Image (cartoon, helix red, strand yellow):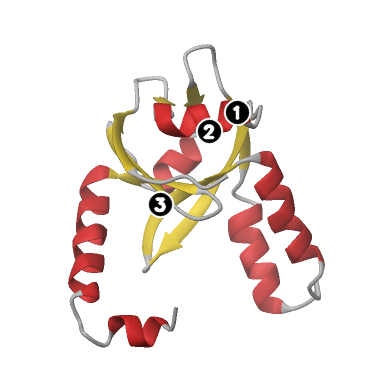
């Protein structure tokens, strides 16, 4: 499953947010009824990443292949795996964002969902606007794609 797009939504007073319809339709086709949500840093900016259970398990399996005593891997697990929560969709297609994760990503009422390759992200809307503008500026550099090496 590949998700695309950016969608603005609001978090309600209880910490619930409606997953974008386009994402939900793709998730429903794959019979996904829960997501794993965790802390993330993109260009040193805080956001959340949301994974389907299948993608989360693939990710965990990659981590299991590594030396569990490696210091950086332990730090990563503490931050990324230790911060993760599994959340269920309610009947209205919403998920409850746990308070610690909302606090970490500085999520207020206005948020933006942004697609990524194997997951999607949830951002403070104002912060996402800045991160997106920075990405757009970087792409204008003629050397950008050469450095990206795609």
Image x and y of residue 28, in percent: 58, 26
Disc 3 target residue: 47
Determine contact: label 2, label 1, CB under 8 Å: yes
Q: Nearer the viewer, mark 2 or mark 3?
A: 2
Of the 4 image quadrants, the one containing the C terminus is: bottom left
Image x and y of residue 116, in percent: 46, 53
Residue 132 visible in the current orientation: yes
The residue at 39%/56% (across/down) is 46
The residue at 62%/39% (across/down) is 85
Q: CA distance from mark 1 to mark 3?
A: 26 Å
Instruction: Name the foreground residue: 37 vs 105.
Output: 37
Q: Nearer the viewer, mark 1 or mark 3?
A: 1
Instruction: Name the foreground residue: 37 vs 83.
Output: 37
Q: Is residue 14 left or right of residue 82?
A: left
Query: SS class of the residue under badge 2?
Result: helix
The residue at 23%/75% (across/down) is 138
Of the 4 image quadrants, the one containing the N terminus is: top right
Q: CA distance from mark 2 to mark 1?
A: 5 Å
Q: Is residue 46 left or right of residue 75?
A: left
Query: SS class of the residue under badge 3?
Result: strand
- Dot 1, how many residues are within 10 Å of its Cα: few (below 14), some (14-19), or many (20+)? few
Query: SS class of the residue under badge 1?
Result: helix
Instruction: Name the foreground residue: 108 vs 61.
Output: 61
Sequence-first tag of 1 and 3: 1
Disc 2 target residue: 26
Q: Is residue 76 left or right of residue 122?
A: right
Sequence-first tag of 2 and 3: 2
Instruction: Name the foreground residue: 140 vs 78.
Output: 140
Image x and y of residue 16, in percent: 43, 24
Depicted 108 relative to depicted 130: above or below: above
Disc 1 target residue: 29
The residue at 60%/36% (across/down) is 35
């Amino acid at each position: 499953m590949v998700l695309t797009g950016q969608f603005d939504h609001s978090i309600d007073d209880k910490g619930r947010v409606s997953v974008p319809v386009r994402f939900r339709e793709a998730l429903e086709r794959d019979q996904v009824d829960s997501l794993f949500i965790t802390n993330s840093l993109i260009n040193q900016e805080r956001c959340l990443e949301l994974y389907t259970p299948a993608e989360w398990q693939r990710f965990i399996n990659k981590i299991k292949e590594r030396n569990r005593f490696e210091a950086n891997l332990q730090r990563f697990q503490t931050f990324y795996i230790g911060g993760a929560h599994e959340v269920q969709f309610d009947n209205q297609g919403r998920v409850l964002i746990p308070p610690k994760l909302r606090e970490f990503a500085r999520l207020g009422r206005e948020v933006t969902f942004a697609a990524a390759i194997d997951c999607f992200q949830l951002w403070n809307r104002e912060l996402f606007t800045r991160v997106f503008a920075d990405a757009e500026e970087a792409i204008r550099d003629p050397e950008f794609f050469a450095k990206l090496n795609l």
